Image: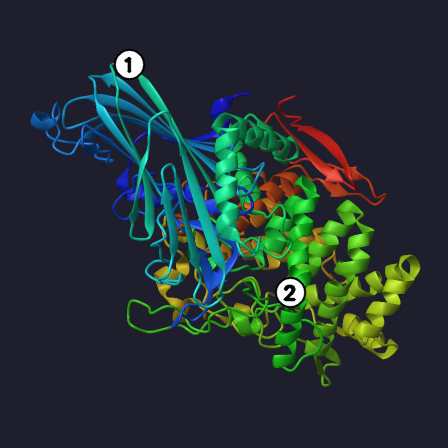
Amino acid sequence: MQHRLWHVSELNFEPSRQRHYETLFTIGNGYLGTRGSFEEGYPGDSPSTLIHGIYDHASGALVPELVNAPNWVILRVSVDDTPLQMITSVSNAEFMNPPNGVVIGYNRSLHLDRGLLRREILFRAKSGNIVRITFERFASLHDQHVMGQRVIITAVDGHPMVTVESAIDADVTNNGTRHFDPEINIRAEGSRTAVLATTMQSGYAVAMASQLVSTHTPTSRRDHHCPTTIVTFKLTQEETVTIDKLSAVYTSRDVTNPFETAAAKAEEAARTGYDALLRAHETEWARYWQTADIVVDGDEEIQRAVRFTTYHVLIATPRHDERVSVGAKTLSGLGYKGHVFWDTEIFIVPALVLINPPLARNLLMYRYHNLQGARNKAAANGYEGAMFPWESTDTGEETTPQWSDVQPDGSRIRIWTGDNEQHISTDITYAIMKYWRWTGDDTFMARYGAEMVLDTAVFWGSRVEYNAQHNRYEISQQIGPDEYHENIDNSVFVNRMAQWHLETALDVIKWLRANAPADAERLLTALKITPERIDHWRDVIAKMYIPFDREKQIHIQFPGFFDMEYIPVPKYHPRTSSVQAIFGHARSIQAQVIKQADVVMMMALLGEDLGVPSEFDVRQVMLNNWNTYYPRTDHGSSLSPAIHAWVAARMDLEEEAYDMLHHAAHIDLNDNKGNVRDGIHAAACGGVWQAIVFGLCGLKIDANGELAVDPRLPQHWRSVSFRVYFRGEPREFTVTNPVRS
């Protein structure tokens, strides 16, 4: 194994990029995510641990958000009474005896294959003594309630006196917003510390407990909201001391008494020991990577990047809980407040369907358990069936804020996505059908999936509008994937996907009647899907308006799009901001500037099934669509590049496919959007996997129901190898580049 292709490293500490690296170096296990903040802290840092499902709606806040849990990673080291701080430069005169110490060597690496974060420091104390300090941490993939830390301290020069303080800090906020009740239960007894905090609105209890494992006798103190354990010892030159901190976390979503359960689990972890816990954790990661890894021969940069993006999908996806889902920023930051968008179903679920089907099923079951919220939203808006919310949390109700935060000029922008970005109901159906067709999980489909597909079809049947003048069905006041253009009529993406959705619903009914008649009767009765309703769906399918320019042989993103101001997007390079940021909100929404793949997204999801009039060549129409919309696309969203890479590969556009893949794979690593400090871009991560497997490798289910590949690899790639699950069985593929073979 080439370990360097499994490591993401920071070789020099750059304070200006501290929050960026905190996000990149997040560790997690599908239950929680902990950012890569320093154990000792740093000015301006943003430490957080986010736990799936723990939301709270603070007083005065517009919407609920995932709660920043108590900080369990604190390990403060002092050398001869000089606290370790990430000070990396002092004057020449002070170097031998720096007044506050100085870091003279540094390396931090995230080991993607092992889910381990490691930091090495060479530290000169004020006394002049030099020590090497190594920190390790992991969130156990074997036991999701356990976290492990190790600090190794070696006297490189001198005989230093060392103090290590281990703490759990419950005095935490979400960027200043408090969610925990001020009355926090804390415990500090020798090597044991614990806290219990309860969210003020939602009433979730969160308990964390730690136990310090050291050969030296500890003492403890009860700091305000921060119980602490301390050990002190003297090192002889070249002597090494290792101290372990084993922590546990439980919430009231898990058990009835999280405080005592967490304390008992921490003691159990201490008895098991760091080394055994790490081995079990690494064994689980090896199992994950057996099917998740994509091996790219001929491009080390992309190889490392695709492992990085896949890692972040895996650590964010719940393993043992089907009532939570992956937010747009995973569990790596407070961006988007931990809300769940279409990012999950369109970008993450399809990858997991092939990598790890049970994880994909968990995410789909989150939607099933929240069907009532979707039904509530449909009824509140005057529609039938189920209308899933654009942003969702633990309740399944709509949680999209109606207004933005205050802008630099003091204004607020109305947010319409919660009202009119309704394609998410079809996005969820797309993910369900993807799961069913690839896994053959008929039990899931009959018991759960079909109900979601059909009740959202009921919604679309009530949502469409009949235009008697033109004898067609239309859908007004929509927001498609291109969110620069709000409240438009007849988005081609929305109209065609709604039509596809109704076609799919009819297929599901046919399958139910043939294979699960009792479920068919149950669902058709419960959802009031009468023969008259089915006839209405057929009429909508036949008469749905799909905007299409017969002369230019292109789909029209929406009527009136080409009447807007034309802005030559490709000329605005290089740029570090979106075109919308350059021209402003008001001008960009009246221009032919597209935020992200829209018509191109439709091409990715439906392939050649685009509703193109039969007299036209669908491949030529797709190429015309690409040539029309690609130059107008801003890629203002992280969701865009991976989809363009996928479609470009299928259109034999090698250069564009690789450029877009490279952009997508490095959105977080290179901070291409300038906001990685707020969390990982989950959709981009899932999109990279799909762009390679579905796009460049051309994996598909062929007309005979078997798997086939049709590769379009970049010229400098020799091969791509990957494994997927298909109908319960693992399949292995290696696609080679004929140019290099």
Name the residue: 19% across, 30% down.
Answer: 102
Across and down, in percent, residue 473 comes to 72, 77
Q: Give the image's coloring scheme.
A: rainbow
Q: Position of residue 78 (x, y in %)?
A: 23, 32
For label 2, the SS is loop
Q: Earlier in the sequence, mark 2 or mark 1?
A: 1
In the picture of the structure, the residue carrying the numbered disc 2 is 370
The answer to whether residue 353 is seen in the rendering is no
Q: Is residue 150 above or below residue 207?
A: above
Quadrant of the frame with the C terminus = top right
Residue 238: mark in rendering = 1
Please name whichever residue, 672 or 232, is drawn nearer the observer in this view of the structure. 232
Q: Residues within 10 Å of mark 1 (few under 14, many from 20)?
A: some
Camera-nearest residue between 668 and 616? 668
Where is residue 57 shown, x and y percent of the image? 45, 67
As rendered, which of 716 and 242 lies closer to the eye?
242
Q: Residues within 10 Å of mark 2 (few under 14, many from 20)?
A: many
Q: Position of residue 672 (x, y in %)?
A: 41, 46
Work out whether 291 lies above or below 198. above
As helix, strand or loop, the secondary structure at mark 1 comes to loop
Q: Residue 190, relative to residue 542: is it above or below?
A: above
User: In percent of the image, x 33 and y 68: which residue is there?
Assistant: 407
Per the model, the C-alpha gap separating discs 2 and 1 is 58 Å
Apparent side of residue 622 relative to residue 15 in the rendered image (left or right): right
Q: How many marks?
A: 2
